[in-house]
Image (cartoon, grey):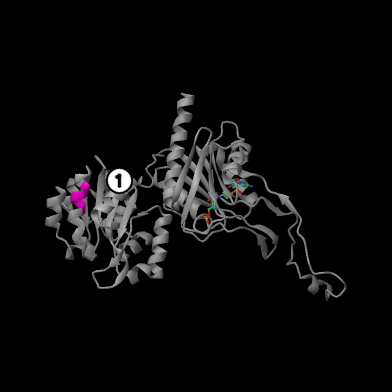
């Protein structure tokens, strides 16, 4: 925390009364703190008390000429090493998720390139409402680190999840967990593949897999937050494009191959998170394939009604990128169900990858479709296990490893 610039946003929940204690904890951990207070928060805590503990003028309004003269809101957004919002109300989460910029705090959220952490606080029913769950998922996809909430008795008398973490616990979480997106990838061009591919059988059917795109989108979001110029080549998913990312939509493995190979020579890094179909039907029927019984009139002629589909292999996208002369650094993901490390090590060597991130897709609590993941990173020289954590956090860790590998490449070429 020593010397870190923390922009603390305080929104209008009862837990805002703990904000002066939080400012004190942050400052005694060595951080410099600037406070932004929303109008609703002023009902719970006064600017004067916050100013006294922060040692700087509290910012309340986007349209404050005096404050803008000292440090304009864009300067404030640039000053921050971290935007911490505590407490973060349901309304604040909804505004962030929707990308609104209707007050100083929401504007700063959009304007800052710094990582963002929020400590939610609200009634337990509000926390569990599908709309809040949806907003939380969007914020996680956008790379926001969520601290808590804790569970227990609430100010309203109900019991359940939604209590803001105690100030000391927030500071401890920020001190011990690397804040997402700490990697500095400014000036780097990074291409990420994400989601599944679909391999057409006929005009209405396809072969595919369970990838939701969450891990790839988290990587793209975090890379953009780390300053990179990010291209996301995406299979069909139902996720919003992360802020600042250029997205190219594709369908089949061959379309993904074409999009990636066209862009790859200009990239510094290509990260293959997509679950690309290894095979596609050898032939795509131009009309909907009829059931055997519908086509023949009946199966009584001795046919058992089964059909088979002949498959052919798809091109390997990341192996193609890795084979480029003077090509980018190439990172692959390995989705394994057994003997994960042995298979991943062999996969990395076979495909010529600089780094492979292996995850166990036989588990229900990580991998396909979930909001969390655990993985082992395998490079030429080291292996690192990453425990189960939100996909955005894991993305932050992968990007730190990539930053390290890029630095080694630079050292070797200089
Ligand atoms: O999308 P989510 O629901 O968030 O789930 C995330 C995930 C489980 C899909 C992700 O973490 C993951 O493991 N991605 C890799 C999936 C995969 O296809 O693994 P693989 O072991 O079959 O392939 C190894 C690597 O080769 C991958 O980087 C893959 O993108 C790449 N590949 C595979 C086949 C092919 N024809 N071309 C490729 O580039």
Q: Quadrant of residue 404?
A: top left
In the image, is the residue at mark 1 within 8 Å of ligand 1 by its beta carbon?
no
Q: Is residue 385 above or below residue 381?
A: below
Residue 8: image location, x then y, percent: 24, 52
**Total numbered labels:** 1
State the SS at label 1: helix
Q: Is residue 79 above or below residue 299?
A: above
Residue furthest right as drawn: 301
Say whether residue 382 is magenta: no
Residue 220 in view in this figure:
no
Residue 380: image location, x then y, percent: 53, 33
Q: Is residue 205 left or right of residue 30?
A: right
Q: Quadrant of residue 141?
A: bottom left
Q: Which residue is mark 1?
A: 175
At x 44%, y 42%, the residue is 399
Q: Quadrant of the N terminus?
A: top left
- Residue closest to the eye, 331 or 227: 331
Residue furthest front as drawn: 339
Residue furthest top as drawn: 414
Residue 111: image location, x then y, percent: 32, 50
Q: Which residues are magenta?
A: 22-26
The chief SS type of the magenta part is: helix
- Characterize the local packing of mark 1: few (<14), some (14-19) or many (20 or more) Cα atoms within 10 angstroms: some
Q: Is residue 220 left or right of residue 311?
A: left
Residue 279 in view in this figure:
yes
- Residue closest to the eye, 16 or 40: 16
Residue 25: image location, x then y, percent: 20, 49
Q: Is residue 183 left or right of residue 56?
A: right
């Amino acid at each position: 925390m020593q010397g870190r610039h923390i922009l603390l946003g305080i929104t209008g929940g009862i837990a805002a009364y703990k904000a002066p204690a939080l400012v004190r904890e942050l400052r005694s951990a060595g951080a410099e703190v600037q406070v932004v207070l929303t109008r609703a928060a002023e009902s719970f805590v006064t600017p004067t008390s916050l100013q006294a503990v922060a040692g700087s003028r509290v910012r309340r309004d986007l349209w404050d000429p005096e404050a803008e003269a000292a440090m304009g809101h864009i300067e404030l957004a640039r000053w921050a090493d971290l935007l911490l919002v505590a407490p973060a109300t349901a309304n604040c989460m909804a505004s962030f998720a929707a990308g609104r910029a209707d007050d100083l705090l929401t504007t700063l959220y959009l304007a800052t390139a710094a990582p963002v952490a929020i400590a939610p606080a609200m009634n337990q029913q509000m926390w569990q409402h599908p709309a809040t769950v949806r907003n939380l998922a969007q914020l996680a996809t956008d790379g926001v680190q969520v601290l808590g909430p804790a569970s227990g008795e609430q100010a309203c008398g109900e019991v359940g999840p939604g209590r803001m973490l105690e100030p000391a616990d927030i500071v401890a979480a920020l001190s011990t967990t690397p804040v997402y997106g700490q990697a500095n990838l400014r000036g780097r061009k990074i291409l990420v593949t994400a989601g599944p591919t679909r391999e057409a059988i006929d005009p209405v059917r396809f072969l595919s897999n369970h990838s939701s795109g969450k891990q790839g989108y988290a990587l793209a979001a975090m890379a953009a937050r780390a300053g990179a110029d990010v291209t996301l080549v995406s299979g069909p998913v139902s996720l919003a494009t992360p802020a600042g990312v250029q997205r190219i939509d594709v369908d089949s493995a061959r379309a993904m191959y074409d999009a990636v190979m066209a862009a790859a020579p200009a990239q510094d890094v290509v990260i293959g998170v997509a679950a690309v179909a290894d095979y596609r039907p050898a032939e795509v029927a131009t009309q909907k394939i009829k059931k055997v019984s519908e086509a023949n009139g009946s199966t009584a002629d001795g046919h058992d009604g089964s059909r088979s589909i002949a498959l052919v292999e798809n091109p390997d996208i990341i192996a193609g990128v890795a084979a480029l002369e003077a090509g980018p650094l190439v990172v692959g993901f390995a989705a394994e169900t057994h003997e994960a490390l042995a298979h991943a090590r062999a996969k990395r060597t076979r495909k010529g990858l600089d780094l492979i991130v292996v995850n166990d897709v036989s588990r229900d609590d990580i991998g396909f479709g979930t909001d969390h993941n655990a993985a082992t990173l395998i490079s030429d020289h080291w292996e690192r296990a990453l425990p189960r954590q939100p996909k955005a956090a894991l993305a932050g860790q992968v990007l730190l490893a990539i930053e390290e590998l890029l630095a080694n490449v630079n050292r070797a070429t200089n």
